[in-house]
Image (cartoon, rainbow, N blue to C red):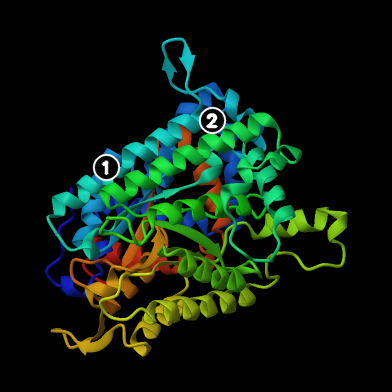
């Protein structure tokens, strides 16, 4: 039940995410952010979740606690259907949604993935990766149906999208690793885009065992169908980035999807449909982006780019240091955060330059999602749109300065944050941008059965420790505490 707003406070002064939240959800959020302000707790969370859910007597209690705290805060629901009310409530605030089925297999368990229990179909056990692929196929028409309910016709308004993680779509992630090794060995020019043609070359058996070749070809077929379905329904697909030892293979599959689903000849009103994720903490990213832009231009397809900072920095440093062959060489990632920040903002400028080069009325040749919890980067995007005459500054009815973004631009640009994180930043960016019925700001919404998304919750907490650090959790705690004081004690 929604709490009543005390009459002494003006609702216009309260951010929508707080004003529309129940008191119970605010208390839950305060508890979650308080727990996440302790780095030791965050580091221990994956082990803690694994241990507590492995003890029969403790499991149900642990699941109940997680369900009513972290799960409800960071996850949209146990199914796509359960997440629809959240999608609709976000859209009321002119926020878009990107859904991700977050059932995955821990990297250490990759070899066991093909043996993992799934749903029983008669006497046949369906592997988890097959269920994951089917869930993605099912989610695309559901995302389209959600958009149809809004009854908005312009392509720029269709902003419910799907994210996919390729390591969750194969029996063993080792296949991606081996294919990446082969792609790098055969690459003639550094940073050139990869494609899957090598997978069908006879020499591939030198690098990959036959069972993995078959699995990769099956993945290729599945991704082709996903791309075709997404183009048919007008639903954007975002392919997640992963560790560098998987990334060349991921790039190859995503590029193949873009070649077909993002072709200038395809009939979907949404283009690009498929987007590849680039990680700014990689030293090679600026050069790879330039090569990707050139490849898309020469092959006549729209390039889809999701730009993030990157989530696997400690593992990348450790992996590089553990290989004696790398002695005396630089790791693939930047050593310092300020280097990553600088690279991210430079990539923003590069991508906005490319978007601005598309003349008015010309078929879109690039689509962008800037995934960031960094205010400076968000301001770089906003000011970049204005400086390149893709948006204009105006004063709204409340006398505040806002940036108006026309549908031709808002159709191609998104700025995203994770559900349950950086809500103050989400509010700030959405309040700065004026793009009615065409949301530019997006929330990434994971979903899946509680037991299945537990590994995701633990991994996400560790990966985003910098986002969940004391300064960020402190901001969110202060915001929620202020609203609770207003409700309980009628004062700010």
Q: Residue at x 35, y 59 (%)?
A: 443
> In this view of the protein, which residue sits in the foreground, 279 or 222?
222
Q: Return the residue at label 2.
A: 53
- Mark 1 or mark 2: which is in front? 1
Q: Find residue 490 and report its image quarter.
A: bottom left
Task: Give the numbered dot on residue 166.
Answer: none
In this orientation, does residue 20 appear?
Answer: no
Callout 1: SS: helix
Where is residue 373 shown, x and y percent of the image?
46, 68
Label 2's element?
Answer: loop
Q: Position of residue 233 (x, y in %)?
A: 26, 48
Q: Residue shown at 35%/62% (left/top)?
A: 264
Q: Where 242 falls versus 67 (above or below)? A: below
- Who's the residue at 32% across and 55% down the image? 266
Look at the image and tell me whether residue 293 can be seen.
Answer: yes
In the image, residue 8 above or below residue 82: below
Residue 441 drawn at (x, y percent): 32, 67
Q: CA distance from mark 1 to mark 2?
A: 34 Å
Does 212 sit left or right of 461 as displayed?
right
Residue occupied by mark 1: 141
Who comes first in sequence, dot 1 or dot 2?
A: 2
Q: Within the image, what quadrant is residue 303 found in?
A: bottom left
Number of dots carrying numbers: 2
- Residue lying furthest top: 123
User: Label 2 crowding class (10 Å Cα cut-off): few <14, some 14-19, many 20+?
Assistant: some
Of residue 119 and residue 220, the one placed in the foreground of this image is 220
Picture coordinates of residue 489, whole percent (x, y): 24, 64
Among the 4 quarters of the image, the one containing residue 69: top left
Q: Residues within 10 Å of mark 1 (few under 14, many from 20)?
A: some
């Amino acid at each position: 039940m929604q709490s009543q707003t005390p009459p002494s406070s003006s609702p216009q002064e309260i951010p929508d995410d707080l004003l529309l939240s129940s008191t119970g959800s605010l208390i839950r959020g305060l508890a979650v952010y308080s727990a996440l302000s302790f780095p030791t707790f965050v580091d221990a969370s994956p082990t803690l979740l694994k241990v507590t859910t492995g003890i029969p007597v403790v499991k149900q209690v642990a699941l109940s606690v997680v369900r009513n705290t972290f799960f409800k805060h960071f996850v949209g629901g146990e199914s796509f259907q359960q997440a629809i009310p959240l999608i609709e409530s976000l859209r009321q605030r002119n926020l878009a949604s990107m859904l991700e089925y977050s059932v995955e297999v821990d990297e250490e368990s990759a070899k066991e993935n093909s043996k993992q229990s799934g749903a029983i179909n008669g006497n046949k056990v369906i592997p988890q990766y097959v269920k994951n692929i089917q869930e993605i196929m099912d989610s695309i028409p559901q995302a389209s149906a959600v958009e149809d309910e809004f009854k908005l016709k312009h392509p720029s308004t269709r902003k419910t999208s799907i994210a996919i993680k390729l390591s969750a779509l194969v029996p063993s992630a080792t296949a991606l690793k081996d294919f990446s090794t082969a792609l790098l060995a055969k690459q003639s020019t550094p940073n050139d885009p990869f494609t899957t043609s090598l997978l069908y070359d006879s020499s591939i058996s030198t690098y990959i065992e036959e069972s993995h070749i078959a699995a990769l070809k099956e993945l290729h077929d599945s991704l082709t169908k996903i791309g075709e379905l997404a183009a048919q329904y007008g639903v954007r697909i975002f392919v997640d980035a992963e560790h560098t030892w998987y990334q060349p293979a991921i790039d190859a599959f995503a590029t193949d999807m873009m070649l077909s689903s993002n072709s200038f000849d395809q009939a979907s009103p949404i283009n690009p449909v498929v987007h590849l994720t680039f990680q700014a903490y990689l030293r090679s990213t600026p050069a790879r982006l330039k090569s990707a832009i050139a490849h898309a231009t020469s092959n006549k397809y729209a390039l889809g780019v999701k730009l993030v900072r990157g989530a696997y920095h400690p593992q990348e440093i450790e992996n590089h240091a553990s290989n004696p062959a790398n002695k005396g060489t630089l790791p693939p990632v930047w050593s310092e955060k300020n280097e990553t920040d600088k690279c991210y903002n430079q990539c923003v400028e590069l991508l906005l330059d490319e978007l601005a080069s598309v003349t008015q009325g010309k078929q879109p040749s690039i689509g962008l999602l800037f995934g960031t919890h960094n205010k400076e980067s968000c301001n770089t995007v906003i000011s970049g749109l204005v400086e390149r005459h893709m948006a204009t500054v105006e004063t709204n009815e409340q006398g505040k300065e806002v940036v108006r973004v026309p549908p031709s631009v808002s159709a191609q640009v998104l700025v995203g944050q994770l559900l349950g994180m950086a809500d103050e930043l989400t509010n700030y960016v959405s309040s700065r941008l004026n793009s009615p019925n065409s949301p530019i700001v997006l929330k990434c919404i994971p979903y899946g059965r509680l037991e299945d998304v537990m590994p995701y919750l633990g991994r996400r907490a560790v990966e985003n420790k910098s986002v969940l650090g004391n300064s960020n959790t402190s901001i969110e705690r202060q915001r929620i505490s202020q609203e609770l004081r207003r409700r309980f004690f009628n004062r700010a």
